[in-house]
Image: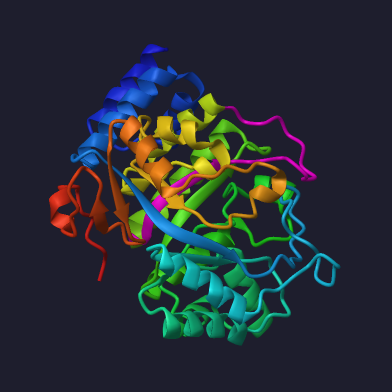
Amino acid sequence: MTDRADQILEKALAGRRLTAEEGTLLHEEADLVALGHTADQVRRRLHPKNLGTFVVDRNINYTNACVADCSFCAFYRPPGHPEAYRLPTEEILRRVGELVSIGGTQVLLQGGLDPSLPLSFYEEICRTIKAQFPQVHVHSFSAPEIDTIAQATGLGYREVFDRLKRAGLDSMPGGGAEILVERVRQAVSPKKLSAAGWFAVHLAAHEAGLKTTCTMTYGMVETAAERVEHLVRLRELQDQTGGFRAFIPWSFQRGHTVLNTPPAGGMEYLRLIALSRLMLDNVLNVQAGWVTEGPKLAQLALSFGANDFGGILIDEVVVGATGMIYRVDKEEALRLIRGAGRIPAQRNTKYEILRMFDGADSNEESLTGDKVFHEPR
């Protein structure tokens, strides 16, 4: 490792903000073990009680009909295709009911970009779920879906969010980010909203009082500098709004897709987890991604800066469409988190602790001792 990389790691450990140039140098030159160790020390400072958190949730993909035609997606079908589907409301409710029956707290509704679906379709889903399962947190839709609704209705993003919020939407996931650099988006998803559009949707969500997460899909055609630019732009919006609860990176899975780039390896994933912890100094939570990376690599990520193990998902099908299928149930998650030297803790979408698994249950969030970032009013 170069002396310069070592100096940048010392700067990060001291709590000083890294520049884009410094982040790129770490990506390209830092020793992986040293980078991971520094990120883990920063994580310990932010989360001193050494928890490994997870949420019990369910992904429900209400339709695979999509006009975006992204080269990295194996899930979508064009509208009108024989394999295109749309789930009826009754089926969505049945699946939410199964989630509730096992103690789940979060439902993530996402689907393809289908301009024929009216805003009332999304409102009905949210309203019906809340009527039957008011305890469930509706963490749903993505920036491209919101953009598609706005384009179809002629409404602004803020008005779309205001209506969905009244119907029961609680927060929005960060899907559709891919790499938030326009050169990359034009190469892999030119029909989807721009990087500026993605940020505009999340800004509108934050202004409407909805928290969101932010994501990255890497390993397509981007450079190291473009990955870091993505992180810096997320950090800038977080400075402005404080609206991101967590950052979740995952690698591009090329199975059954048009895009055929070499797969990113596990070491590259750990490097990106550690780098994101150091660059995103204002985003409290970094999530390990077992859905794409596998449970053992996600466990390692807990020692490279990640503090959260993500969701114990039911029915994940978007990544599964590429042929990459992992399964982790609650007991396996507890074993993996303990194996990483952490205390397992079930959380909700707001990262409030619902239950500790260190031999004694706890409903007291204050018992975690973790740093709390107060949400803007």
Q: Residue at x 61, y 33 (%)?
A: 223
Above or below, comparing residue 24 to residue 147 in the picture: above
42 vs 229, left or right, is: left
Most prominent secondary structure in the magenta stretch? loop
265 vs 282, left or right, is: right
Region rendered in magenta? 242-265
Give the image quarter of residue 281. top left
Q: Residue at x 40, y 63 (%)?
A: 104
- For the residue pair 287 and 18, the one nearer the viewer reads as 287
The image position of residue 224, as x and y in percent, is 56, 32
Figure coloring = rainbow
365 vs 75, left or right, is: left
Above or below, comparing residue 316 to residue 295 in the picture: below
Q: Is residue 321 magenta?
A: no
Q: Is residue 262 magenta?
A: yes
- For the residue pair 107 and 351, the one nearer the viewer reads as 107
Q: Residue at x 68, y 37 (%)?
A: 221
Task: Tell me, yes or no, if residue 171 can be seen here.
Answer: no
The image position of residue 215, as x and y in percent, is 50, 50
94 vs 212, left or right, is: right
Above or below, comparing residue 2 to residue 56 in the picture: above
- For the residue pair 236 and 298, the one nearer the viewer reads as 298
